[in-house]
Image: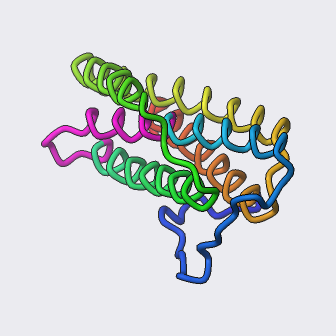
Amino acid sequence: MKYDTEIIRPAMRDADVRLRAGSAPPADLKLIRKGLLTLHTLKLMAVTIYRCQITPRSTGLDRALVAAMCNEMTHLQDFQVMLYEYGWRPSPLRWAYWIVGWCFGTFSRLRGPRAILKTGVWVETKAVHRYSELLGRIPWDDDTRAIVEKNQADEYGHVERWKSMLRGG
């Protein structure tokens, strides 16, 4: 893997912000918009899941959940920034993904650490597959593709971390 998944929040400089409206043919822009909206809402759900799974205890799992939440918040910001760079806005229906995230996070926390880890593996595996689908179908520009690929690599890292913790590692 060419991305360091131990980096939770990569640096972003002012010069990295680029206005992209009209930077691609209209048919490509339609696909890019749909992809960014999908990724943004799914990241909102992921942040909410992790936020709701964190307990007041000081355990290794709680530390890992905080780190994963922070990483997902970075992904959420990545996609929100890109939406605005293209001149678009997040979906007004994103609240529904917050509710789904709250349900997954809260109910898995109530069921205990194994349920939290299994939920993490399941959700992050779905994310990896969704990223693969969007990377293969959407004509991303090079900068955006690199961000999407880095975020997908982070999801692989989350899957491996949760699987390792399930095995007792």
Q: Residue furthest left?
A: 56
Please state the horizontal and vertical placement of residue 114, each as a whole percent of the image: 36, 23
Q: Is residue 121 magenta?
A: no
Q: Residue at x 26, y 16 (%)?
A: 111
Residue 154 horizontal side relative to residue 63, left or right: right
Q: Residue at x 61, y 26 (%)?
A: 126
Front residue of 55/147: it is 147
Please state the horizontal and vertical placement of residue 150, each as a whole percent of the image: 67, 56
| Quadrant the N terminus occupies | bottom right
Front residue of 54/164: it is 54
Please state the horizontal and vertical placement of residue 154, each as a whole percent of the image: 59, 50
Q: From this view, report whether residue 166 is shown above or below residue 73.
A: above
- Magenta: main secondary structure equals helix
Q: From this view, report whether residue 63 is shown above or below residue 125.
A: below
Asked which quadrant contains residue 52, the reply is: top left
- For the record, the magenta segment spans 42-61
Q: Residue at x 76, y 58 (%)?
A: 22
Q: Residue at x 66, y 50 (%)?
A: 153
Residue 137 horizontal side relative to residue 153, left or right: right
Residue 129 horizontal side relative to residue 5, left or right: right
Please state the horizontal and vertical placement of residue 164, each as a whole percent of the image: 52, 38
